[in-house]
Image (cartoon, rainbow, N blue to C red):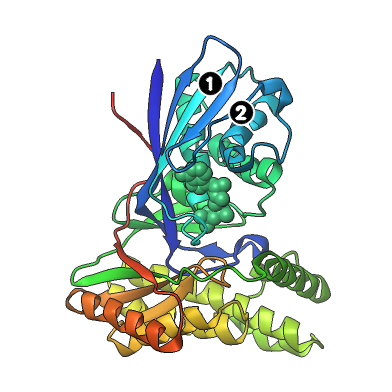
């Protein structure tokens, strides 16, 4: 008996570094995803294979401990988290095949974890509901693998709806699918293929800075500041760095909310300036871009994109542009040419179509 589930990667249309500020994000799932085929075994081993890896990894369930298993940790961690919750996990063979680029900020890790969790839930008839699957997959990445992800990636992989973005409230973890009308427009993704430089240290610095600012302002999280509170909050902070972070987070939440309103009204073209304003805020205030990201975003706008911004955690990864369909090819070529002039590695690019979240495939 075996079952196959496929879970997608994602791009984030707008709203980065929202989790620890308990704010808003608006990802959508992409067509690229990870397929996990899971079957029970006659022995009690956990065997994980990936088409993208040479060697299978075999572990006895009793030997599972956080950080074990290398790349297979993203699959083994699901079994570990279930056992921590007091469930029996029999011997399983887990076979993975993914076309999400790894380490590009498109969340190949959440695609993997969510495909495994949904397949195991189905195969073992665990009856985990949407909230339990979210908790299980977050725990796998945070506690077993040790990756400080905040839940947006897993929400997108589990709950996305085709042709919609997923409006996520990272305080309540409530989600709402918002239709994206893409008539005559495309979301062009440029993968900078730049090495993430110091990304984890810089992430921690932003996170600690935002938390310090919230403490100094006497609020639970920066989410609790509205646009009208911004000037007085900035006046109460001494450090320029913290002021920049607060300005970014508060304006960002406003941009996400405004984007959702415009999408609901069917006016996708009008979100362009919000995307570009977001890029400027991440470059100047939050300072999480690198030259490869800035060049791609600026070049897309010069080539006719209605707006463009980096997406994901920053310091590498991808840029998205909202581009009139007839300009997509020329915009991609313009970024390639700009990269060649700047002496950067050639980028990769693709058009992203908002896709569905995790689903069972085959019989
Ligand atoms: P991202 O989620 O942005 O792609 P991460 O560093 O969070 O980057 O996750 C990438 C990791 O996920 C890889 O290093 C690998 O351990 C694991 N992974 C992703 N896809 C696969 C796959 N197809 N086969 C094996 N491991 C994979
Ligand atoms: Mg990841």
Name the residue beneath numbered marker 2.
Answer: 79
Residues marked 2 and 1 touching at CB (< 8 Å): yes
Q: Position of residue 111 (x, y in %)?
A: 47, 46
N-terminal-most mark, 2 or 1: 2
Q: Position of residue 241 (x, y in %)?
A: 74, 84
Q: Position of residue 346 (x, y in %)?
A: 39, 74
Q: Is residue 300 above or below residue 16?
A: below
Q: Mark 2: few, some, or many residues within 10 Å (few <14, many ≥20)? A: many
Q: Position of residue 64 (x, y in %)?
A: 70, 29
Q: Residue at x 35, y 49 (%)?
A: 161
Side of 349 where 281 appears, left or right: right
Task: Estimate the spatial distance between the alpha carbons at disc 2 and disc 1, rounded to whole Å.
Answer: 9 Å
Q: Determine the residue located farthest toward the front in the rendered image.
A: 54
Name the residue beneath numbered marker 1.
Answer: 92
Quadrant housing the C terminus = top left
Viewer-nearest residue: 146 or 218: 146
Q: Determine the residue located farthest toward the top in the rendered image.
A: 42
């Amino acid at each position: 008996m075996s079952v196959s589930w496929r879970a997608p990667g994602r791009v984030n249309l707008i709203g980065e570094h929202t989790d620890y500020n308990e704010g808003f994000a608006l990802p959508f799932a992409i067509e690229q995803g990870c397929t996990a085929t899971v079957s029970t075994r006659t022995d009690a081993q956990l065997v994980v294979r990936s088409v993208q890896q040479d060697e299978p990894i075999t572990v006895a369930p009793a030997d599972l401990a956080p950080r074990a298993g290398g790349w297979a940790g993203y699959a083994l961690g699901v079994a570990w988290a279930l056992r921590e919750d007091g469930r029996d996990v029999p011997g399983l063979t887990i076979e993975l095949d993914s076309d999400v680029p790894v380490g590009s900020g498109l969340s190949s890790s959440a695609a993997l974890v969510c495909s495994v969790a949904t397949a195991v839930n189905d195969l073992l008839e665990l009856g985990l509901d949407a909230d339990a699957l979210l908790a299980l997959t977050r725990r796998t990445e945070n506690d077993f693998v040790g990756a400080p992800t905040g839940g947006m990636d897993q929400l997108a992989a589990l709950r996305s709806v085709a042709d919609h973005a997923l409006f996520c409230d990272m305080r309540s973890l409530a989600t709402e699918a918002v239709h994206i009308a893409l008539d005559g427009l495309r979301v062009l993704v440029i993968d900078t293929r730049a090495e993430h430089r110091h990304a984890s240290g810089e992430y921690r610095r932003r996170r600690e800075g935002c938390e310090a600012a919230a403490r100094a302002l006497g609020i639970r999280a920066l989410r609790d500041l509205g646009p009208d509170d911004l000037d007085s909050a900035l006046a109460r902070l001494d450090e320029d760095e913290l002021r920049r972070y607060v300005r970014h987070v508060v304006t960002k939440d406003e941009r996400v909310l405004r984007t959702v309103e415009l999408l609901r009204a069917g006016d996708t073209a009008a979100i362009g300036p919000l995307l570009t304003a977001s890029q400027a805020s991440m470059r100047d205030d939050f300072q999480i871009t690198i030259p490869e990201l800035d060049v791609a975003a600026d070049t897309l706008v010069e080539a006719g994109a209605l707006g463009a911004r980096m997406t994901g955690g920053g310091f590498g990864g991808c840029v998205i542009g909202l581009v009139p369909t007839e300009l997509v090819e020329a915009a991609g070529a313009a970024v390639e040419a700009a990269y060649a002039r700047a002496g950067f590695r050639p980028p990769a690019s693709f058009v992203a179509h908002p896709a569905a979240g995790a689903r069972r495939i085959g019989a």
